[in-house]
């Protein structure tokens, strides 16, 4: 077995079975904030036990191990073809070992060949840079939270949402309202203002690579993130829609250029089982550092 293959299998195992530290800290804070004896507190304690058991047994946190999405930052002249071949083999082997569930099916026939391989599975995004480091980040995105993502084309008359930041705020909060009780909350929002329909969703998902505790370097977007997080948590939707103080764990927003005729706001939703991990590889493709 190649060194790169072993490194990617371990990345998949850890991503599937262990919540990143920043997400776990946010969940602990949320549990402490819920009123004692409420359904919200009970739901958060079940989540806490689930996380502990999955890590101890090295088993998937959720029965839906989700879409497998790699984000690779690599030097110029990096062999992307070989990497993608090895990534596919790693997904197949990780599925055989039980780190990933057999839940990728052919969209036409519904057939499941048990490998999690097929068109778009896994998905690999490459970004080359002039540095020497190779970093591989992995997101396992479940179908339940993917189902409650939303894309709005402004203006939205029914929401009184115009083509401005207030309009963006209105539609983002509408996405939170529409998702209540679904998507396995408390969740995290990744949002892109602008772009076209495809890049808007792509950029919104890239926001999940940020640490939950970071702050947006753009003061306008930072203020919008903090406002939506507070407002959403004041709505009383709570964990799993049972009521409570924790509807969202975080909000991450970016902006992309758009053509004047279009104004899209793309909202991706991540469930509490926020499976995101990353590694830095050394020259021999061994794991030299964990990124989260």
Image: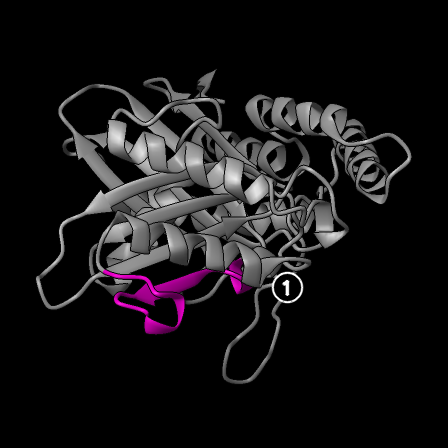
* Closer to the camera in the image, 256 or 117: 256
Total numbered labels? 1
Horizontal side of residue 165 vs 36, given as left or right:
left
Horizontal side of residue 78 vs 101, given as left or right:
left
Q: Secondary structure at mark 1?
A: loop
Query: What is the magenta range?
Result: 146-162
Residue marked by disc 1: 114
Q: Is residue 88 visible?
A: yes
Q: Residue furthest top?
A: 288
Q: Position of residue 33 (x, y in %)?
A: 72, 26
Horizontal side of residue 134 vs 97, given as left or right:
left
The colour scheme is one colour
* Closer to the camera in the image, 66 or 240: 240
Number of residues whose C-alpha sits closer than 10 Å to that of mark 1, classed few (under 14), some (14–19) or many (20 or more): some
Residue 158 colored in magenta in the image: yes
Q: Position of residue 154 (x, y in %)?
A: 26, 65
Hey, which quadrant is residue 225 in on the image? top left
Residue lying at 64% horizontally and 43% vertically, measured from the top left? 186
Residue lying at 56% horizontally and 52% vertically, measured from the top left? 92
Residue 172 colored in magenta in the image: no
Q: Residue furthest left?
A: 260
Q: Position of residue 217 (x, y in %)?
A: 26, 24
Height in image: 141 above or below 102? Answer: above
Height in image: 202 above or below 281? Answer: below
Residue lying at 68% horizontally and 29% vertically, measured from the top left? 30
Height in image: 111 above or below 65? Answer: below
* Closer to the camera in the image, 41 or 207: 41
Residue lying at 26% horizontally and 33% vertically, measured from the top left? 220
Horizontal side of residue 228 vs 82, given as left or right:
right
């Amino acid at each position: 077995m190649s060194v790169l293959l072993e490194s990617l299998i371990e990345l998949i195992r850890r991503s599937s079975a262990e919540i990143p530290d920043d997400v776990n800290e946010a969940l602990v804070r949320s549990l402490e904030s819920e009123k004692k004896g409420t359904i919200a507190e009970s739901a958060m304690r079940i989540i806490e036990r689930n996380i502990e058991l999955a890590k101890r047994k090295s088993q998937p946190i959720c029965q839906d191990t989700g879409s497998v999405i790699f984000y690779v930052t690599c030097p110029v002249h990096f062999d992307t073809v070989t990497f993608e071949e090895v990534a596919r083999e790693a997904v197949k082997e990780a599925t055989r070992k039980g780190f990933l569930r057999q839940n990728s099916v052919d969209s036409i026939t519904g057939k499941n060949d048990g490998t999690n391989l097929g068109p778009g599975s896994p998905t690999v995004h490459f970004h080359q840079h002039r540095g020497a480091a190779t970093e591989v980040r992995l997101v396992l995105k479940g179908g339940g939270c993917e189902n409650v993502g939303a894309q709005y084309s402004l203006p939205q008359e029914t929401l009184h949402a115009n083509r401005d930041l207030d309009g963006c705020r209105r539609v983002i909060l509408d996405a939170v309202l529409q998702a209540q009780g679904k998507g396995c909350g408390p969740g995290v929002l990744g949002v892109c203002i602008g772009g076209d329909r495809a890049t808007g969703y792509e950029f919104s998902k890239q926001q999940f690579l940020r640490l939950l505790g970071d702050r947006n370097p753009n003061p306008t977007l930072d203020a919008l993130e903090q406002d939506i997080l507070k407002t959403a948590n004041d709505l009383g939707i709570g964990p799993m829609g049972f009521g409570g103080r924790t509807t969202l764990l975080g909000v991450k927003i970016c902006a992309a250029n758009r053509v004047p005729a279009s104004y899209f706001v793309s909202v991706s939703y991540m469930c509490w089982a926020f499976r995101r991990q990353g590694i830095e590889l050394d020259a021999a493709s061994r794991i030299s550092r964990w990124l989260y």
